[in-house]
Image (spheres, helix red, strand yellow):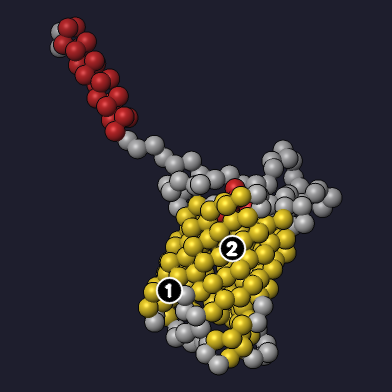
Amino acid sequence: MKRTHLVVFAACCVAASVVTAQQQPEKPQLPKSQVPDLGRPTRVTDEQPTFNFAEYFVGKWSFEWDVPDGPLGASGTIKGTTIYKHVDGPFFEASTTATAPAGPFGVKESIAYRLEGKTAARWVTDTRGFSYAQVASVGGDLGGYFNLYFDGSPFAYKGKTLRIKNALRLTSPIRYRNTVTVSVDGGPFTNYGSAWFEKDVTAPSK
């Protein structure tokens, strides 16, 4: 191959690689852990990291939840999405759209998070016909996990008095587990399944 042809061929290869690079979509940047990198192994005397609610939750999450027969409905799989938004200061809101074996439903939440007190509170309104309040303690460990334990107020639904507890285990910046237990008419809290939530890193967080 002549030198002129080699130069032309090389130029074409460079141009093709530039076009290919331009055509490839940019990969979304994954959220980072809120646990600081100390540059050494953790010690029991290290201070627990502070949880930033907005940094973690704001955005769109999808979930899937296998539920047993119970006071909230028939057994089966619930699938849906939850969108968290920052309102102002320590206040947030969340909106869930989901489909259960009995059909679609929605949930609205008004949330307050006290960074200094490591506590959260929320008011939950479910389109299936009930509302309740919850308070939570917020904790973390040096392994990088955070936990929110929500304890719910009693509410009436279909002739029974219910209470709901949620244990949120934040296992990574884009994934957490919500374990639900329910008490009926003052009885013991029994398992109502666990839902895994996964954050959509391609959706804008506002």
Q: Callout 1, which amino acid?
A: Phe
Q: Callout 2, which amino acid?
A: Ser
Can you see residue 43?
no
Give how far across and how far down residue 87 sits, in percent. 57, 52
- Residue at left 52%, top 66%? 108
- Compute the Cα span from label 1 to label 2: 17 Å
| Residue that protrudes farthest toward the top in the picture | 3
- Residue at left 65%, top 49%? 89
Say left or right for 153 vs 65.
right
Give how far across and how far down residue 91 sits, in percent. 63, 55
| Residue that protrudes farthest toward the front in the picture | 88
**The N terminus appears in which quarter of the rendering?**
top left
- Look at the picture and state if 111 lies above or below 195: above
- Residue at left 41%, top 40%? 27
Q: Secondary structure at mark 1?
A: strand
Instruction: Mark 1 vs mark 2: give the one in front.
Output: 2
Nearer the N terminus, badge 1 or badge 2? Answer: 1
Q: Secondary structure at mark 2?
A: strand
- Look at the picture and state if 179 lies above or below 4: below
Can you see residue 136?
yes
Give how far across and how far down residue 180 sits, in percent. 59, 75
Q: Kindly identify which residue carries mark 2.
A: 110
Say left or right for 78 vs 148.
left
Give how far across and how far down residue 59 sits, in percent. 50, 52
The one of 157 and 65 positioned closer to us in this rendering? 157
Mark identifier at residue 105 = 1
- Residue at left 69%, top 41%? 37
- Look at the picture and state if 132 lies above or below 1: below
Say left or right for 38 vs 14.
right
